[in-house]
Amino acid sequence: MRFVTMSHFRSRQSELLASVHAEPVTLTSRGVGRRAVVVSPELYDRALEALEDRIDVESAAEARKEGGSVSHREMIAELGL
C-alpha cells in the first residue's frame, strides 16, 4: 500500500489515481493520520461482495441457532437469485 499526503495527492492526482489498479493509495494528513484509502473499482466491488457474503453467512448461522428453517425457495428469493 502506498502512503501519500493530501497535498501530494492533489498535485499528482491523475498519476496516483491510475496507480490504484496496482495497489491502494492511502491519503494522510498532518495531525490526523490516515484520511482515506483510494482503491480501484474492481477491488471495491470485490470487497463489497465479500462483505455482503459474510453478512449472509452470519444471518444463516443466526437462523440455525434460533432453530428456525428457511425453505430453498425462500433462500433463493432472499439472495435475489
Image (cartoon, grey):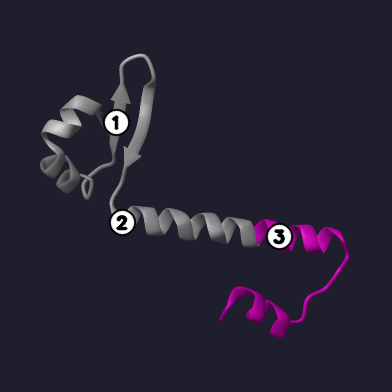
Nearest the viewer among 72 and 29 is 29
Q: Say which residue label 3 marks.
A: 59
Instruction: Compare residues 79 and 34 and report the one nearer the observer.
Output: 34
Extent of the magenta region: 57-81
Q: Is residue 69 shown left or right of residue 41?
A: right
**Of the residues under marks 1 and 2, which one precedes in the sequence?**
1
Q: Amino acid at mark 2?
A: Pro
Residue in the foreground of this view, choosing between 51 and 33: 33
Quadrant where the C terminus sits is bottom right
* SS type, badge 3: helix
Q: Earlier in the sequence, mark 1 or mark 3?
A: 1
Q: Residue at x 16, y 27 (%)?
A: 8
- Local crowd at mark 1 within 10 Å, few (<14), some, or many (≥20)? some
Q: Mark 3 packing: few (<14 Cα in 10 Å), some, or many (20+)?
A: few
Q: From what the image shows, is residue 51 above or below residue 3? A: below
Element class at badge 2: helix
Name the residue tied to disc 2. Answer: 41
x 11%, y 35%: residue: 12
Q: Is residue 27 left or right of residue 71?
A: left
Which quadrant, please, contains the N terminus? Answer: top left
What amino acid is at disc 1?
A: Leu
